[in-house]
Amino acid sequence: MAPAKKADKKATLDAAAWMFNVVTSVGIIIVNKALMATYGFSFATTLTGLHFATTTLMTLVLRCLGYVQPSHLPFKELLKFIVFANFSIVGMNVSLMWNSVGFYQIAKLSMIPVSCLLEVVLDKIRYSRDTKLSIGLVLVGVGVCTVTDVSVNTKGFVAAFVAVWSTALQQYYVHYLQQKYKLSSFNLIGHTAPAQAATLLIVGPFLDYWLTEKRVDMYDYNFVSVMFITLSCTIAIGTNLSQFICIGRFTAVSFQVLGHMKTILVLVMGFFFFDRDGLNLHVVLGMIIAVLGMIWYGNASSKPGGKEKKNYSLPTTRQQKHGAALDYDEHQGKV
């Protein structure tokens, strides 16, 4: 295949992956908001466990049909991933309960610089000036959109700190494991989803009771609420899979930066479906700034030097050159 056609095909697949993630992510947020706000199903951790249980069933079906090939992931690596992923879910839920909405949003925004730090330290990535500025512009824009009241307390700060770092590590690890063990998105999610489902369905009901003082088994289940739970679990298959696809194709930082398009779409969709007073000039200005930052980031990071690994090749000294010449002469003499 010609290089130009390969580039076009990659661009098409990249766009499809992003669209898949955006549609499923926005869809599940809207469904979950209706489920929790309208029908009072406030058991977020248990619901996430059900999401991963449904995703596990999907991977088992695909494996039986031959679409997912057997693969290997060391137990130590799987265990580390599950710890990061579950602390991320639990940390986010606890952070939302213990912090103001404004500080919760600031904590979510801080995932981008934390993800950048992980790439700089662990992958030796170097960002150009334009890439750094574009990330800053996205943070400002999303901050203007979402951050309102900001109040901080000690336990809320600790919960946010755990949530931010565990989420950043989990997303970094998605990319790392796929690259190191040559795993497809289906393979990786086939390893991680069953373990996450098992742990969250065990811990979830107790954690949800602690957070809400309500028991999931005492919830008043009816046809409509069960239908919304089923719909949420179905969409979650696409959300979980598309996250792995996007991070595998790109990096955790790109996923975070461009992923804030979902935040903007959720605000817009929320305006049309829920709170018609939520969209004002202040929020629209923030959206415009954020979108401009995303466009700038996409352009800056794709340019040569926009985002690349540092090269630590050592300069060749005269002594090294002389030694190499002697080795070459000796080799020639032996031949």
Image: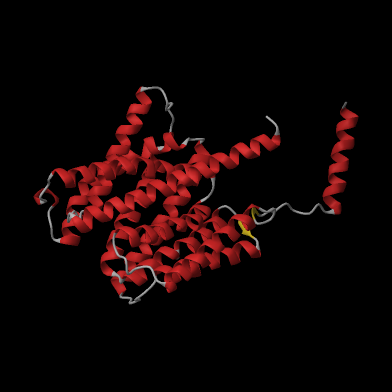
Q: Residue 325 placed where, x, y %?
A: 88, 42
Horizontally, residue 244 falls left or right of residue 35, namely right
Front residue of 20/204: it is: 20
- Residue 57 makes an appearance in the image: yes
Counting the numbered discs, the total is 0
Residue at figure coordinates x 28%, y 61% from the top left: 274
Q: Quadrant of the N terminus?
A: top right
Residue at figure coordinates x 16%, y 57% from the top left: 209
Q: Is residue 235 above or below residue 99?
A: above
In this figure, which colouring scheme has been used for the structure? secondary structure
Residue at figure coordinates x 10%, y 50% from the top left: 220
Q: Is residue 273 above or below residue 333?
A: below
> Which of the 4 image quarters holds residue 108?
bottom left
Query: Residue at the top extreme?
Result: 65
Front residue of 332/69: it is: 69
Front residue of 131/334: it is: 131
Q: Residue 272 placed where, x, y %?
A: 34, 59
Q: Quadrant of the C terminus?
A: top right
Q: Residue 235 placed where, x, y %?
A: 33, 43
- Residue 80 makes an appearance in the image: no
Horizontally, residue 319 falls left or right of residue 135, namely right
> Which of the 4 image quarters holds residue 191?
top left
Q: Residue 125 placed where, x, y %?
A: 60, 55
Horizontally, residue 228 falls left or right of residue 286, namely left
Residue at figure coordinates x 13%, y 57% from the top left: 214
Horizontally, residue 240 falls left or right of residue 33, namely right
